[in-house]
Image (tube, rainbow, N blue to C red):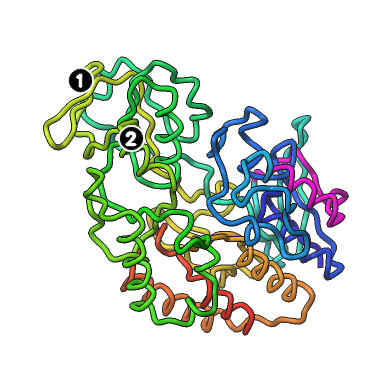
Amino acid sequence: MSVCVIGAGLSGLAAAHALRGRGADFVCLEKAPDVGGIWRMPGAGEPGPAYRALHLNSAKQLTGYVDFPMSAELPLYPRHGDVAAYLRSFADWAGLLPHLELRTEVLSVRQGPDERWMVTSRDADGVEVVRGFDQVVVASGHHSEPALPNPLPPGADSFGGTILHSTDYLDGKDFAGQRVVVVGLGASAVDIAADLSRHAERTVLSVRRGLHIVPKQLYGVSVDLIAEAPWFTGKPLDEQRRLVEEALLVARGKMSDYGLPEPDHPIFSSAVTISDEILSRIRHGAVTPKPAIASLDGDLVHFADGSSAEADAIVFCTGFRMAFPFLPAGCPAGPQGPVELYRRIVAPDRPGLYFLGLIRPVGSITRLVEAQARWVAGIVAGDTALPSADVMHKEIDEYLSGIESRYGLSTGSSVQVDVGSYQRELSEA
């Protein structure tokens, strides 16, 4: 069976490794000059959802591949450059280099009447090629299309400074001496605000909605190690919540103690933000929390509480749209709709199309992606059979029903998974 893997980041390399282990005939297409996905972008000076201060938020033991652990010499949370070097070493060690086509952008993926997939790609010389494959594995990630607020705050046209998205942010040194407003409370927002606070004249963090900020360690243990520990995953959700919320009160107190809004939801009912730095930077006066932006007027940023601050730049850390422009419209999700994939991997009505890494766990994604890759490789090898499309749609409906009751249904929430239960689901499949 011939297989096309799209993307050579962490998920694409996991897919390639699993397929090679099964003796599959495959090629891995990557539009960047090297492997590594978002981790290689800062050093290469390419646009992307990464920045020079980026570190792992998950422990290296769980972020490295099972068959190729990260070096004992690396810190527990390595820098982006270390992760990029590790992924390059893995590709070499795993014998994946002959299967890689770098600087090759996928333009179109379409299924013919014979159910074979026609993949149109363009190489570095601008030459377009159309090839047929029995199966396609999409592992290109979902941080490709920046999502700015639409519309921008009133008065944005009058703002004389720079408005940018986190994907355009590279280094806090670029804003030395400036007054900067960072919008958001997700991982990028708190990382960028902390980084800026060491260079900018003033750093303001504008927060519309409260989120649970979780330190990288609780009880002296990395939180992602806790997230997949059997003693934790075996507990009911309400007990997990109670344990973590009590630990958070001891570790950092309430969000309102820092001038941040309290979350309007219990933990694990929305994405959490993992950070060791942002609360400390607020306490040291290096970052000033403010509510949502109400309007802009020249160099003044007006906030919802009636206060204002002068600004030279605004960095919107407002996430990304889940975009796969090379796929047919609505696959795997329509505009603002949920992602509809069997076991978060298979497109039921498009035989031979699989997605890897299109999930959002609390903690490291690597073990889950490796489990996905092994499962897909088993399908390719003929050892695993998929149920009928009707059965797959039923599973998707049941999964999304659970998501809706816990998180509310949206594109982002529809890719949330719990580490322990999802691992068991794939191992039992």
Q: CA distance from mark 1 to mark 2?
A: 29 Å
- Residue 117: image location, x then y, percent: 70, 59
Residue 355, above or below 423: above
User: What residue sits right under mark 1 in the picture?
Assistant: 297
Residue 185, above or below 417: above
- Amino acid of disc 1: Asp
User: What residue sits right under mark 2 in the picture?
Assistant: 284
Residue at x-position 22% and y-position 24%: 309
* Residue 412 figure quarter: bottom left
Q: Is residue 54 magenta?
A: no
Q: Which tag, 1 or 2, sits closer to the chain's start? A: 2
Residue at x-position 37% and y-position 41%: 280
- Amino acid of disc 2: His
Residue at x-position 53% and y-position 75%: 420
Q: Which residues are magenta?
A: 84-107
Q: Is residue 95 magenta?
A: yes
Quadrant (top left/top right/bottom left/bottom right) for the N terminus: bottom right
Quadrant (top left/top right/bottom left/bottom right) for the C terminus: bottom right
Residue at x-position 72% and y-position 65%: 66
- Residue 110: image location, x then y, percent: 64, 55
User: Relative to residue 69, is residue 288 drawn left or right?
Assistant: left
